[in-house]
C-alpha cells in the first residue's frame, strides 16, 4: 500500500517537473520570438499606422469641399507695391474647426471598421489596417506570404489638434508665393500582439497656394493676426 502511494507521488512529481519544464521552455521561446520579431513588427506597424491615419484625415478634410478662395486679400499702394495682407482669421478658424471634427469622426469610424460618415466608405474591415505575414519578417521573397499574419490596428490616444500656418517664399522674378496650410496632429497608438506603441502623426493640408506680383514686406511674412 505504501509502495503504491510512493509510486503515485513520484508520478505526480515527475508530471509536475515535466509541466514546469514545458512552461519554462515555452516562456523562453516566446521571449526569444518576441525579441526577434518586435523590431521588425514595430517598424512596419508604425509606418502603416502613419500612412493609414494620414490618409483618413486627408480624405475627411477633402470631402468637406472647403471654400478657401477669399482667405487672403492683398492691398497695394498707387505704385502697385504691396502694403498689406489681410487674412480672414474668422473663416480660417471655422474651416479648421470643421476639419478637426470631420477628421476625428473619420478616425473613430476607421478604428472600429465602420462606415466613414463623410466618404461613406469602410476603410479597414474590423479595424485591421494591415495584416503582416510572419514570413515577410524573414526578409526572404520565397517566404514572404508564408505563415500566419499579425494584425495591426490603430487607436487615437487624444483629440486632434489643429494649427494654421501662413508661409511666403520668393517665386521667380519679383513674385511671391503665399501659402496657407492646415496642420493636424494626433497621437496614435500602434496595436499588435507584439507592440503597443504611441506614434505622433502630423498631417499638412494646403488650403491656399497663391502667386502674387511684388515683394511682401518682411514684417508681414507669416503674420496671421
Image (tube, rainbow, N blue to C red):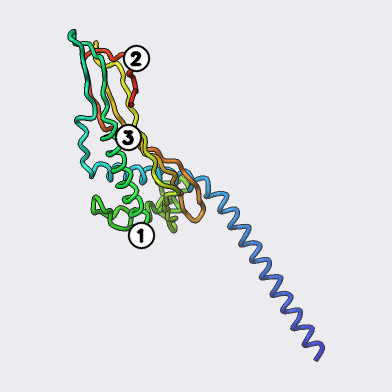
Q: Residue at x 74, y 75 (%)?
A: 13
Q: Residue at x 26, y 24 (%)?
A: 86
Question: Closest to the observer: 78 or 20?
Answer: 78
Is the residue under label 3 in contact with that under label 2 (CB below 8 Å)?
no
Name the mark nearer the viewer: 1 or 2. Answer: 2
Quadrant in which the C terminus appears = top left
Q: Earlier in the sequence, mark 2 or mark 3?
A: 3
- Few, some or many C-alpha atoms within 10 Å of disc 2 (few <14, some 14-19, many ≥20)? few
Question: Closest to the observer: 169 or 48?
Answer: 169
Quadrant in which the N terminus appears = bottom right
Say left or right for 100 vs 82. Answer: right
Please, what secondary structure does the residue beneath circle 2 have?
helix
Q: Is residue 50 above or below residue 8?
A: above
Q: Is residue 171 above or below residue 108?
A: above
Determine the CA span between mark 1 and mark 3. 30 Å
Q: Which residue corresponds to mark 1?
A: 126
Please, what secondary structure does the residue beneath circle 3 have?
strand
Determine the CA span between mark 1 and mark 2. 52 Å
Say left or right for 190 vs 17. Answer: left
Say left or right for 61 vs 49. Answer: left
Is the residue under label 2 in contact with that under label 1 (CB below 8 Å)?
no
Residue 137, how many percent across, how many down? Answer: 47, 48
Determine the CA span between mark 2 and mark 3. 22 Å
Marks counted in the figure total 3
Name the mark nearer the viewer: 1 or 3. Answer: 3
Q: Which residue corresponds to mark 2?
A: 218
Residue found at the far top of this picture: 79
Q: Which residue corresponds to mark 3?
A: 182
Quadrant of the rendered image containing residue 131: bottom left
Amino acid at each position: 500500500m505504501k509502495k503504491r502511494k510512493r509510486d503515485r507521488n513520484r508520478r505526480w512529481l515527475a508530471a509536475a517537473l515535466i509541466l514546469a519544464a514545458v512552461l519554462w521552455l515555452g516562456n523562453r521561446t516566446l521571449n526569444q520570438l518576441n525579441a526577434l520579431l518586435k523590431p521588425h513588427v514595430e517598424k512596419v506597424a508604425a509606418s502603416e499606422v502613419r500612412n493609414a491615419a494620414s490618409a483618413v484625415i486627408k480624405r475627411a478634410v477633402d470631402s468637406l469641399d472647403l471654400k478657401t478662395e477669399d482667405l487672403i486679400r492683398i492691398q497695394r499702394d498707387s505704385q502697385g507695391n504691396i502694403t498689406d495682407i489681410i487674412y480672414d482669421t474668422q473663416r480660417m478658424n471655422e474651416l479648421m474647426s470643421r476639419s478637426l471634427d470631420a477628421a476625428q469622426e473619420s478616425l473613430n469610424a476607421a478604428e472600429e471598421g465602420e462606415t466613414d460618415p463623410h466618404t461613406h466608405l469602410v476603410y479597414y474591415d474590423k479595424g485591421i489596417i494591415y495584416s503582416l505575414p510572419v514570413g515577410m519578417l524573414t526578409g526572404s521573397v520565397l517566404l514572404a506570404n508564408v505563415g500566419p499574419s499579425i494584425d495591426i490596428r490603430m487607436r487615437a490616444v487624444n483629440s486632434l489638434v489643429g494649427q494654421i500656418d501662413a508661409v511666403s517664399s520668393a517665386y521667380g522674378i519679383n513674385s511671391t508665393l503665399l501659402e496657407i496650410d492646415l496642420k493636424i496632429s494626433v497621437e496614435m497608438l500602434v496595436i499588435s500582439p507584439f507592440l503597443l506603441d504611441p506614434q505622433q502623426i502630423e498631417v499638412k493640408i494646403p488650403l491656399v497656394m497663391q502667386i502674387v506680383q511684388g515683394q511682401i514686406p518682411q514684417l508681414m511674412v507669416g503674420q496671421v493676426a
